[in-house]
Amino acid sequence: MKTVTLYTDGACSGNPGPGGWGAILEWGGHEKELSGGEISTTNNRMELTAVIRGLEALKEPCQVELYSDSKYVIDALTKGWAWGWKKRNWIKSDKKPALNPDLWEILLSLTQKHQVNCHWVKGHAENPKNNRCDELAVAEWKKLK
């Protein structure tokens, strides 16, 4: 199984507001940048979309080292929260509806296809790839303002 490194970030101007996402895929000495945006969205939706688009770009099942500054994404995956929400028909343990079930449904199915190891990184810090993903995401929402 090929090992791929995926860096992701999402950004929003207002929450909700115009948003963007950025992703960088690295494998075998190659690097590919992906990005996109939506006119009206939230920061968390853009964080999720970045991971989804990165995983969808893979043509075969891979071992993926995912680096994100989103505690929402990383904790929901590593702590099993998202699977719990799904089992309870997208209701959280506090009985409130889970947000973004449409995107979580897609992401959880992708984690069944790929072996994803999650790593949280501090945003706007010393990780150049995370900073580049932030630049890509911000550039996308700026196009939509």
Image (spheres, rainbow, N blue to C red):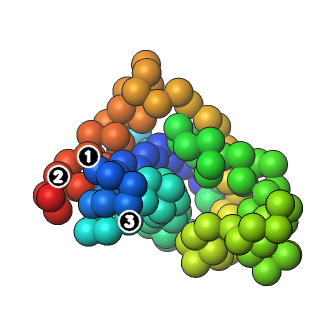
Q: Amino acid at mark 2?
A: Lys
Q: Nearer the viewer, residue 139 or 119?
A: 139
Q: Quadrant of the C terminus?
A: bottom left
For marks 1 and 3 on the same chain, the one whose residue lies earlier in the sequence:
3
Mark number displayed over residue 142: 2
The residue located at (61%, 35%) in the rendering is 120
For the residues marked 2 and 1, what is the alpha-carbon distance in whole angstroms? 6 Å
- The residue to which callout 3 is attached is 41
Residue 116 locus on image (x, y percent): 68, 53
Q: Amino acid at mark 3?
A: Thr
Residue 26 left/right relative to 83: left
For the residues marked 1 and 3, what is the alpha-carbon distance in whole angstroms? 13 Å
For marks 2 and 3 on the same chain, the one whose residue lies earlier in the sequence:
3
For the residues marked 2 and 3, what is the alpha-carbon distance in whole angstroms? 13 Å
The reply to whether callout 2 and callout 1 are in contact (CB within 8 Å) is yes
Query: Label 2 crowding class (10 Å Cα cut-off): few <14, some 14-19, many 20+?
Result: some
Q: Quadrant of the N terminus?
A: bottom right
